[in-house]
Image (cartoon, rainbow, N blue to C red):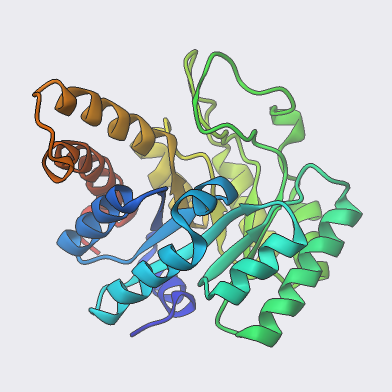
Amino acid sequence: MKSLREWLSWTEEKRVAIGHFNISDSEGFKAVVEAAKGLQVPVIIGVSEGEREFIGLEEIVALVKIARGNGLPVFINADHTYSVEKAKAAIDAGVDSVIIDAAEKSFEENVRMTKEIVAYARLKNPEILVEGELGFIGKSSKVLDTIPDGVSEETQTKPEDAKKFVEQTGIDLLAPSVGNVHGIVKTGEPKLNIERIRAIRQAVGIPLVLHGGSGNKDDEFINAIDAGVRIIHINTELRLAYKEGLAEAVKSGEVAPYKFMQEAVEDMKKVVISKLRVFNGELTQ
């Protein structure tokens, strides 16, 4: 079975991206894994600090390892981890990748924290990928009235800063601010800065991760992938599909959870399948 690192090499060859979908329970897990299995493509299960506290870090790692043991290229990422201690705990639990997110701190502190996690991961298991984040894109995975404060074209990641950050930390993956924003903005999602993505990728020479993909158009994803993005995060769209599917299902009067939850799972699967088809070049590569 290929490692996540090996699958990233595959994305380079095919010029595609791996879909990263956040979940917080077994229904979300079921939807993402079944969708990826049906399309025969790799996928990353993402769990933020709050999500992994809800489902259980060891529990979700075990579910992913069972899926992988059954031959499915499913991986687990400890998404947006804001402390060194929690990042180390995720590594100890056996995740495939971890994001140490110190984007709101000073450049120097971001480097220090990220570098510490890179060193720790290398000692524990060199196959674990460490992702750093440079540039703020907001924190909320909700439907927002306006673009979050602190997110603007002026605050987007600069290629020269990204290059210095990667050189000083030794990270495997970089999540930049390039017009992306967490959540879905009611007044319209900001446009991705494709030329900035291309310039950063050329400067750093490692795969880029696009956070806050919910709400962006398919053509933007295609252009971002062409410019060097190799992992794309989707969360808010999946949460909305889950909530709407469940709300519709409970109207039936059905009381068996495995029956009324299935509609929510199917609605989530539709979102995942749609995104995976785009991220994988409509599966024609």
Counting labels gives: 0
Question: In the image shown, does 120 or 51 lie closer to the viewer?
Answer: 51
- Evaluate whether residue 188 shows in this view: yes
Of the 4 image quadrants, the one containing the C terminus is bottom left
| Quadrant in which residue 235 is drawn | top left
- Evaluate whether residue 283 shows in this view: no
Going by the image, does 267 lie left or right of 85? left
| Quadrant in which residue 91 is drawn | bottom right
Across and down, in percent, residue 135 comes to: 72, 43
Across and down, in percent, residue 221 comes to: 41, 43
Q: Is residue 208 above or below residue 119?
A: above
Q: Is residue 214 above or below residue 117?
A: above
Of the 4 image quadrants, the one containing the N terminus is bottom left
Going by the image, does 106 lie left or right of 81? right
Across and down, in percent, residue 57 comes to: 51, 62
Going by the image, does 257 lie left or right of 279? left
Q: Is residue 51 above or below residue 44?
A: above
Going by the image, does 133 lie left or right of 285? right
Across and down, in percent, residue 253 comes to: 10, 24
Q: Residue at x 68, y 83 (%)?
A: 122
Q: Residue at x 42, y 63 (%)?
A: 60
Q: Residue at x 26, y 26 (%)?
A: 244
Question: In the image shown, does 164 or 148 lie closer to the viewer?
Answer: 148
